[in-house]
């Protein structure tokens, strides 16, 4: 996919919020934010930046059912009893019912994704469920809220002197705990948000002028190198 026209980009954000609101997700999602270029009123939008705040799945809240089709040749009775073992055998993925919901994996086995160790990766599962293949979207997924993670990532980037790890602080909350912000969507559509440059935003977070300029340049350069769909998971 090429650049997104502004109206198309905001439509795409609404589709993502609709899915989070109405469909079973691999883990509970608490917040959806848009950040970066789409919040600045650009048209077209080179890449769409989306942030999801998720819960860590401590206890699987999947509904238990006694029968029914679960897709892709998975034995439903075994899945209900031991989803980890069932999906390990059928898909080579561990952690179903532990890091992602068992009933989500049963309903959407085509979206099940694993990390390099073969363990179900919530951020990759969310990306597979919510995004189209190779569309120009960058998805950030973390258990911390957007605002908290901005400061956490800033601290880590400064310690490592790797500003590509920064989270662009220019964000707008679209949905939180089941409530959609129609006003936020309106402002996005009408380009009404007055946001500073990235370097100025970083200065507001405590960086000096020279450091903020260098950090913004590094982050812009990293972003320009990204193609298609990218996803980054983070735990704070």
Image (tube, helix red, strand yellow):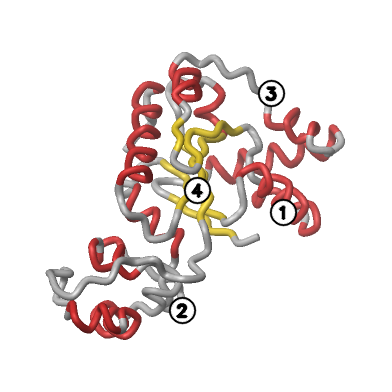
Q: Nearer the viewer, residue 137 or 10?
A: 10
User: Disc 4, disc 2: CB below 8 Å?
Assistant: no
User: Disc 4, disc 3: CB below 8 Å?
Assistant: no
Q: Residues within 10 Å of mark 4 (few under 14, many from 20)?
A: some
Q: In the drawing, what numbered circle is on residue 196?
A: 3
Considering the numbered disc 4 on the image, is that residue within a helix, a strand or a loop? strand
Count of numbered badges drawn on the protein: 4
The residue under label 4 is 30
Q: Please give left or right for residue 228 compared with residue 194 in the image.
A: left
Q: Nearer the viewer, residue 205 or 85?
A: 85
Tell me the mark number nearer the camera, choosing from 1 and 3. Answer: 3
Locate the N terminus and report the quarter of the image it occupies. top left
Q: Residue at x 80, y 57 (%)?
A: 159
Q: Is residue 88 above or below residue 126?
A: below
Q: Earlier in the sequence, mark 4 or mark 3?
A: 4
The residue under label 2 is 117
The residue under label 1 is 162
Q: Position of residue 57 (x, y in %)?
A: 48, 66
Q: Can you tell which quarter of the image residue 116 is in? A: bottom left
Considering the numbered disc 2 on the image, is that residue within a helix, a strand or a loop? loop
User: Disc 1, disc 4: CB below 8 Å?
Assistant: no
């Amino acid at each position: 996919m090429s650049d997104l026209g502004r109206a198309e980009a905001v439509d795409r954000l609404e589709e993502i919020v609709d899915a989070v609101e109405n469909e079973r997700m691999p883990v509970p999602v608490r917040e959806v934010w848009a950040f970066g270029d789409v919040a600045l009123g650009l048209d077209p939008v080179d890449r769409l930046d989306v942030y999801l705040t998720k819960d860590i799945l401590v206890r699987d809240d999947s509904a238990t059912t006694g029968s029914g089709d679960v897709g892709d040749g998975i034995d439903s009775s075994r899945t209900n009893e031991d989803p980890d073992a069932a999906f390990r055998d059928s898909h080579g993925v561990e952690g179903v019912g532990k890091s992602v919901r068992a009933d989500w994996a049963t309903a959407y086995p085509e979206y099940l994704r694993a990390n390099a160790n073969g363990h179900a990766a919530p951020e990759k599962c969310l990306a597979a469920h919510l995004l189209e293949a190779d569309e120009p979207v960058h998805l950030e997924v973390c258990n911390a809220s957007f605002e908290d993670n901005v400061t956490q990532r800033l601290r880590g980037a400064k310690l490592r002197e790797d500003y590509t790890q920064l989270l662009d602080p220019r964000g707008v909350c679209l949905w939180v705990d089941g409530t959609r912000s129609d006003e936020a969507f309106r402002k996005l559509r009408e380009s009404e948000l007055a946001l500073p440059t990235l370097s100025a935003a970083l200065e507001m977070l405590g960086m000096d002028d020279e450091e903020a300029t260098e950090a913004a340049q590094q982050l812009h350069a990293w972003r320009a190198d990204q193609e298609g769909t990218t996803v980054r998971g983070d735990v704070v």
